[in-house]
């Protein structure tokens, strides 16, 4: 009886110890599971990141589409619509040009900030409209379109003299956060990337200056009713060419190897 008691209590202690060790192991596993995210959690987080990146991309694209519609689509449709109902060329151009003018004034009022390039373009449009009112010539109104693209081209080229070129800020707004971060890091740390980006920025500035010069020539040499559509087609064609040329250069140039997503 006395001999079996120690063995009995010993077996109880072993059993308790086993249960305690099992509990300890279960607790360790539970804590580990708390520390390590599950596959479902990682997939959910990845999906959320992708959705956030897509939303970030859509916002500037939507703003760009709105600007193109207000500054090009509506004036063009207004001009040819008013000409179709018999309004003369001068008034059709004035009414069509009023849409981007009012949009620019509205943007200034909403943001409570005067953008230098925007203020310059608005002032140029007002002055050219006043000159056209004095001369009565619709060709002066057509030539005013060159003020906008010319000023924009000069501003792009002028950004090369500053700390950051225009294309860096304009491009990263359309990128997912992680891709934009690679471009920012490349700008800070890679001299080849900076040279390449300045080259592409100069190309964009030159294209807008070419468009401005061509608009002046078209305004005073082509039939008045042909100039609005010709100017729009020219700008779209130039933008397609410079965009595709830029993409080709970025994909091929060693200067952009560190920031490309395709390796």
Image (cartoon, helix red, strand yellow):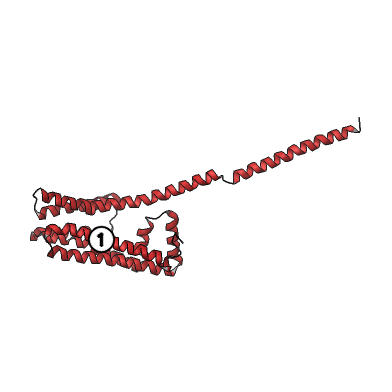
Q: Where is residue 192 in the image (x, y as percent from the top left)?
A: 42, 69
Instruction: Tell me the element at label 1.
Output: helix
Q: Where is residue 163 in the image (x, y as percent from the top left)?
A: 38, 66
Residue appearing at x 86%, y 35% in the figure: 7
Task: Report how many numbered discs are placed on residues in the image.
Answer: 1
Instruction: Name the one closer to the observer, 78 or 132.
Output: 78
Can residue 120 be seen here? The reply is no
Q: Where is residue 3 in the image (x, y as percent from the top left)?
A: 91, 33
* Residue 103 located left or right of residue 11: left
Q: Position of residue 255 (x, y in %)?
A: 42, 68
Which residue appears farthest toward the top when viewing the image?
Answer: 1
Residue 29 placement: quadrant: top right
Residue 6 placement: quadrant: top right
Q: In this view, does 115 lie above or below 27?
A: below
The quarter of the image holding the N terminus is top right
Q: Is residue 72 above or below residue 192?
A: above
Residue appearing at x 39%, y 64% in the figure: 250
Q: Mark 1 points at which residue?
A: 237
Neighbours of disc 1 within 10 Å: few (<14), some (14-19), many (20+):
few
Can residue 215 be seen here? The reply is yes
* Residue 52 located left or right of residue 94: right
Instruction: Name the one closer to the observer, 95 or 227.
Output: 227
């Amino acid at each position: 009886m006395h001999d079996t008691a120690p063995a009995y209590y010993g077996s109880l202690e072993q059993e308790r110890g086993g249960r305690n060790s099992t509990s300890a192991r279960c607790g360790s596993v539970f804590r580990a599971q708390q520390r390590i995210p599950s596959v479902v959690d990682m997939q959910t987080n990845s999906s959320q990141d992708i959705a956030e990146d897509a939303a970030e991309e859509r916002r500037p694209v939507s703003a760009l589409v709105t600007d193109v519609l207000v500054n090009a689509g509506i004036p063009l449709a207004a001009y040819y619509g008013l000409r179709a109902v018999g309004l003369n060329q001068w008034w059709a151009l004035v009414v069509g040009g009023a849409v981007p003018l009012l949009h620019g004034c509205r943007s200034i009022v909403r943001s409570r900030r005067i953008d230098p390039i925007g203020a310059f373009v608005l002032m140029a449009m007002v002055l050219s409209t006043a000159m056209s009112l004095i001369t009565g010539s619709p060709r002066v109104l057509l030539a005013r379109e060159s003020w906008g693209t010319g000023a924009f081209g000069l501003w792009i080229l002028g950004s090369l003299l500053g700390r950051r070129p225009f294309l860096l800020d304009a491009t990263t707004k359309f990128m997912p956060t992680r891709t934009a971060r690679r471009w920012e890091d490349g700008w800070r740390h890679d001299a080849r990337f900076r040279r390449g980006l300045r080259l592409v920025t100069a190309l964009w500035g030159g294209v807008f200056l070419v468009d401005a010069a061509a608009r002046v020539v078209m305004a005073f040499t082509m039939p008045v009713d042909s100039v609005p559509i010709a100017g729009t087609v020219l700008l779209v064609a130039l933008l397609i060419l410079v965009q595709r040329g830029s993409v080709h250069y970025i994909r091929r140039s060693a200067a952009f190897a560190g920031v490309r997503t395709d390796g």
